[in-house]
Amino acid sequence: MPDNTYDVTPLAEPVKKNVDVNAASSVPGSTAAAAEAAQQETEKTEDIEQNRPMAVLAYMGPFVVVPLVFARESAFARFHANQGLLLFLLEFGLWSVNWVLGFLFMPTLARSGFFNALAHLYGFAAGVIWAVFAIMAFIGILHAIAGVDDKLPVIGHFRIVKV
């Protein structure tokens, strides 16, 4: 009768290297870092595609409130809402100045040639400023449609909304 008993000795466990997952993902060029960067890029692309209309609305005057309320989680919409809010506040400020000056000086314009000339100069300067605001809004809309977050000239470096 054959002997079915075997003398088996287990092999030693392989030595595991102590690998820190966070350390591997922080190394540029590692697979984990590349996968994380690809996932972030995919999320950013999805964010841009979903919130492009909200970003366009941010440059349309009082409609800047829409992305601030309905797209709070979107970094892309918040960026453009910040740019649009800056532009809207400047437009509102110019409108307020125009209204106050028109209310204060309208009665004197009919009687004085000096104030009449001054009003024409101010009107021309205000018209140029309105044109600059319109161009900046158009640039912002083009950036929103293109899906980029480039800052507006001159005012783009200021931040009101947390981006």
Image (spheres, rainbow, N blue to C red):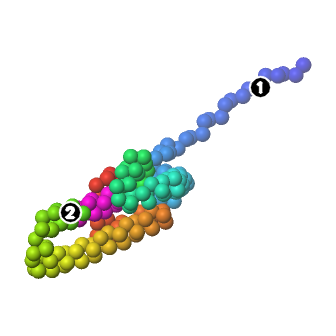
Q: Residue 162: say if magenta.
A: no
The answer to whether residue 51 shows anywhere in this view is yes
Considering the image in quadrants, where does the N terminus appear? Answer: top right
Disc 2 residue type (three-letter): Trp
Residue depicted at 45% across the width and 67% down the height: 142
Query: Furthest-front residue in view?
Result: 110
The answer to whether residue 76 shows anywhere in this view is no
Q: Earlier in the sequence, mark 1 or mark 2?
A: 1
Residue depicted at 31% across the width and 65% down the height: 156
Q: Position of residue 15 (x, y in %)?
A: 56, 40
Which residues are the magenta region? 83-94
Disc 1 residue type (three-letter): Tyr
30 over 13 or under it: above or below:
below
Q: Which residue is mark 1?
A: 6
The mark found on residue 99 in the picture is: 2
Q: Position of residue 65 (x, y in %)?
A: 36, 51
